[in-house]
Amino acid sequence: MNKELTKKLSSGHSTCAGCGIPAIVRTVLDEIKDPVVVANATGCLEVTSTLYPYSAWKVPYIHNAFENAAATISGVETAYRVLRKKGKIPGQARDGSTKRTKFVVFGGDGGTYDIGLQSLSGALERGHNFLYVCYDNQGYMNTGGQRSSASPYGANTQTTPPSKIDIGNEIFCKDIMKIVSAHGIKYLAQANVAYLEDLRRKVKKALAVKGPSFLLVLQPCTNEWKFPSSQYVYYGKMAMETNFWPLYEIEDGKYILNNEIKERKPIEDFLKGQGRFKHLFAPKNKKTIERIQMMVDKKYGELKCLTGNKGCQCDLEK
Amino acid sequence: MDKNKLALTGGAAMAEALRQINPDVFPVYPITPQTPIVAAFAQHQADGKVDTEIITVESEHSAISASVGSQAAGARTVSATSSQGLALMNEILYIASGMRLPIMMLVSARALSAPLNIHCDHSDVMGARDTGWIQIFSENVQEAYDNTIIGMKLAEESQLPVMVIMDGFITSHSVENATLLPDEVVKNFVGEFVPDSSLLNSKDPKTFGTLALSENYFKFKIEQNSAINLSAEKYAKLAENFSEISGRKKGYFEEYELANAESAIVVLGSTAGTIKETVDKLRHQGKNVGLLKINFFRPFPHKEVAKALDGIKNIAVFDRAMSFGTYPPLYTEIINSLKRVTGYELRVTSYVYGLGGKNIFQKDIEKVFNDLEKDYISQEIKYINHE
Ligand SMILES: Cc1ncc(C[n+]2csc(CCOP(=O)(O)OP(=O)(O)O)c2C)c(N)n1
């Protein structure tokens, strides 16, 4: 494997074939030229990279529990500030290098939107210097694909199976970007594993701000979205091209849309071929797909409105 | 007048010890009756007397989680809590000990909900007795101060987390005279903290908190158990050193008029004070009564306790916590200790007292000693003043 890419997260970990998580981690860490400490919430990334006596991590790494990665990094970052003042950073002289250690968290959507939300909120509010990266595969994948508050409407998950009377997940997913943004942090962005150059650019910006920053990165999951293992990039692209997952940034409270699509593809282009949405293509569920389309368009309209685009027709304008 | 002799609450005394220790990081969340510790320490910090960073986290779960991060980064880390806070930390208490992180937790012991109750008992710390933390109990303000200093050093020497426990309100909020050691003496006693490994060492990157399946997990737990057992000897040495520098005798337990006693009570924490007074009174009346006050509860010094109690005819074990559906925690430990001395199981009665801050008076203790004298021994758990 590429030597540069595996400099911080080595090969030999045990993510599923066709998993996008390592590409996200490597892209993020590759942008960091300073020393870095990684904290990781319990989940797929953690269990596949740290099986004792092995570790895929070539940078300092800590996994504490599921819901507390942000609190954990608060402790690490605070320790760094105190010990730096005292000239007690191991391996660094007192006046030392001008390099500042960077702190990065990786957490799944469950560990971020749900069980880890309080810990994340606290760490953001206190203003620790860290980058939080949520790899969003829209469910609790490590435990077999249960619904999280990031799971999309209509999805078949282990806890929301469709039936004669049920369409699958009946809740529209939580807007974590707005929640994080409400903490008044300087930089956050929505990204996608299918667009690594865009992710790279966002990591750079995120690291440049003082205080916390946040990246929400879509990570199509071959195992639980149920598509062939060669296709995570394809589904990432479809998510973007249908406006299901727009790429955007919130910089000092200002929204910036990164991809303006001339003509968005119909949502079916994203849904079809994914086992978790298969049931939606039954004639009786036609209305559900229409609803999803409506929601995608409405949310995208809102986003355009937030970016200052006049002439949009979302509720915010009224 | 001794300038090191001060009138302090238990909370303020622990905060004085912390000031002298000068920890690096203190993640903390408020809960009664832990608040006097933190209020006093925050003042020391605001006055620039320490270099500590206090992280005012959003929950106890995050207080202990941040402590794990900070300690793994190689910073000397302390926190403080009570009751629901300690219960909320429970998941991460195991992680701190499993990762062998020498965090010190100061606990102002308090009852657990439901029903909600803010007063003293030992339900919170007993709920944490199997988490792999060393647990040291304090009888009074002086001991709360002393144990904070010993606890910090013990944690770092054993590479295990330590809970230093005082009784909520009874000790945490009561003003008593305490003699502090000079700052320099404390600094010398605890020394500089030099971590074994640190997350901040990018030249020697370490993975903390791995996944270990059945192949290795059991082995880790056995190693962890021998580490906590070994901490007992380390404590004994530190207690001896501390006795020398302070002139105050420290150890696994205190034997009060125990040597030739026929009846004895075993207890943890502040009630030892009331029992001592009762023992004095009854001794004055010519009764052979005594007290064994346990200081070191985890790891439990079974062998030494058995030796101390050997020869005593009847024993009452006082627990300030219940273990629903079975015998309470201290009683169980005493029975386990006395297995080494044949025939003793039948001479020991379990008493539960003081739940949710319920008072216990000398007359209640006298009655227990009377019962012991009359051989009123039973396998039933007895409740003092529960009505
Ligand atoms: C307190 C707690 N509750 C539940 C679990 C079980 N658990 C472990 S990983 C996981 C799913 C993680 O989901 P997510 O954060 O979305 O990450 P992913 O699995 O998708 O990588 C769950 C539910 C746990 N480890 N700890």
Image (cartoon, rainbow, N blue to C red):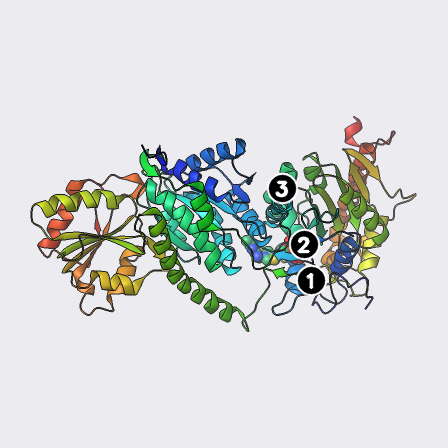
| Quarter that holds the N terminus of chain A | bottom right
Question: Front-most of B379 and A25?
Answer: A25
**How far is the residue under mark 1 from the one under mark 2?**
9 Å
The local secondary structure at tag 2 comes to strand
Residue type marked 3: Ala
Which quarter of the rendered image does ligand 1 occupy? bottom right
Q: Give the residue drawn at x 20%, y 45%.
A: B276
Q: Residue B232: image x %, image y %?
A: 38, 61
State which tag comes first along the sequence, 1 or 2.
Answer: 2
> Looking at the rendered structure, which numbered label has been put on residue B148?
none
Q: Give the residue drawn at x 42%, y 43%.
A: B82
Residue type marked 1: Trp
> Could you classify mark 2 by the number of other residues whose Cα lies within 10 Å: few (under 14), some (14-19), or many (20 or more)?
many
Please determine if labels 1 and 3 lie on a single subunit: yes
Q: Residue A279: image x %, image y %?
A: 73, 57
Question: Is residue B352 visible to us here?
Answer: yes
State which tag comes first along the sequence, 1 or 3.
Answer: 1
Give the chain letter at badge 2.
A
Q: Residue B325: image x %, image y %?
A: 31, 56
Give the chain letter at badge 1.
A
B36 to the left or right of B254: right
Q: Mark 3 points at which residue?
A: A123
The local secondary structure at tag 1 comes to loop
**How far is the residue under mark 2 from the one under mark 3?**
15 Å
Q: Name the residue under label 2.
A: A38
